[in-house]
Image (spheres, helix red, strand yellow):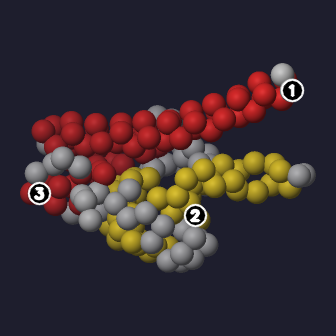
């Protein structure tokens, strides 16, 4: 398995130092890790299992979560913990038993401040996670815009 995206490109010793900051957390099948709008105090790295990210929507008169993406081992979730206003932008649920590493925001930020040579590439890795999410939403938006244009000209 390639290195987790959080520590991608870091020398092995630096990656190990970052990963050592994580606290193991287990999710049961169907358990919600966080909900849209919840206060974001931690970043998560999936060790095993899977996490679905969903956007709560009202469909056919009822509220339901529409899955936007699913992440597997090695992926980072919860970037909102590092960027104000520190609120989650989606709802995360484990569709099956899932093992995570949980990184407390304050502890991770203090580590990065004390080790800028590690903090800089770590920040770039988090930016890549955010950029990936932006690409997903851009593709969804473009599909919807195309559908709207097609319907208007049908």
Which numbered disc, 3 or 1, marks the residue closer to the eye?
A: 1
Residue visible at 36% across and 37% down in the picture: 127
Image location (x, y in percent) of residue 78: 45, 50
Image location (x, y in percent) of residue 87: 54, 43
Which numbered disc, 2 or 1, marks the residue closer to the eye?
A: 1
Give the residue at mark 2.
93
| Cα distance in 3D space between marks 2 and 3 | 30 Å
Q: Relative to 95, is 58 above or below?
A: above
In the figure, residue 83 lies in which quadrant? top left
Q: Relative to 115, is 18 above or below?
A: below
Residue visible at 69% across and 53% down in the picture: 66
Q: Residue 124 or 44: which is nearer the viewer?
A: 124
Kindly give the residue lying farthest to the front in the view shown: 154
Element under label 2? strand
Q: Using a 10 Å C-alpha cutoff, classify the residue at mark 1 as few (fewer than 14 neighbours), some (14 to 19) or many (20 or more).
A: few
Q: Using a 10 Å C-alpha cutoff, classify the residue at mark 2 as few (fewer than 14 neighbours), some (14 to 19) or many (20 or more).
A: many
Give the residue at mark 3.
12
Which mark is first along the chain, 1 or 3? 3
Element under label 1? loop
Q: Say which mark, if any, is on residue 65.
A: none
Kindly give the residue lying farthest to the top in the view shown: 153
In the figure, residue 100 lies in which quadrant? bottom left
Residue visible at 80% across and 54% down in the picture: 63
Residue visible at 75% across and 48% down in the picture: 57
Q: Relative to 138, is 35 above or below?
A: below
Quadrant holding the N terminus = bottom left
Give the residue at mark 1.
154
Image location (x, y in percent) of residue 145: 71, 28
């Amino acid at each position: 398995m390639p290195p987790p995206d959080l520590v991608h490109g870091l020398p092995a010793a630096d990656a190990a130092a970052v990963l050592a900051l994580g606290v193991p957390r287990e999710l049961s099948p169907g358990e919600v890790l966080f909900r849209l709008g919840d206060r974001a105090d931690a970043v998560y790295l999936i060790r095993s299992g899977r996490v679905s990210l969903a956007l709560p929507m009202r469909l056919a008169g009822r509220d339901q979560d529409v899955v936007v993406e699913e992440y597997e081992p090695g992926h980072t979730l919860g970037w909102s913990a590092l960027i104000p206003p520190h609120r989650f932008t989606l709802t995360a649920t484990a569709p099956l038993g899932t093992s995570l590493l949980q990184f407390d925001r304050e502890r991770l930020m203090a580590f990065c401040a004390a080790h800028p040579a590690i903090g800089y590439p770590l920040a770039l890795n988090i930016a890549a996670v955010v950029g990936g999410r932006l690409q997903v939403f851009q593709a969804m938006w473009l599909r919807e815009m195309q559908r709207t244009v097609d319907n208007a000209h049908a």
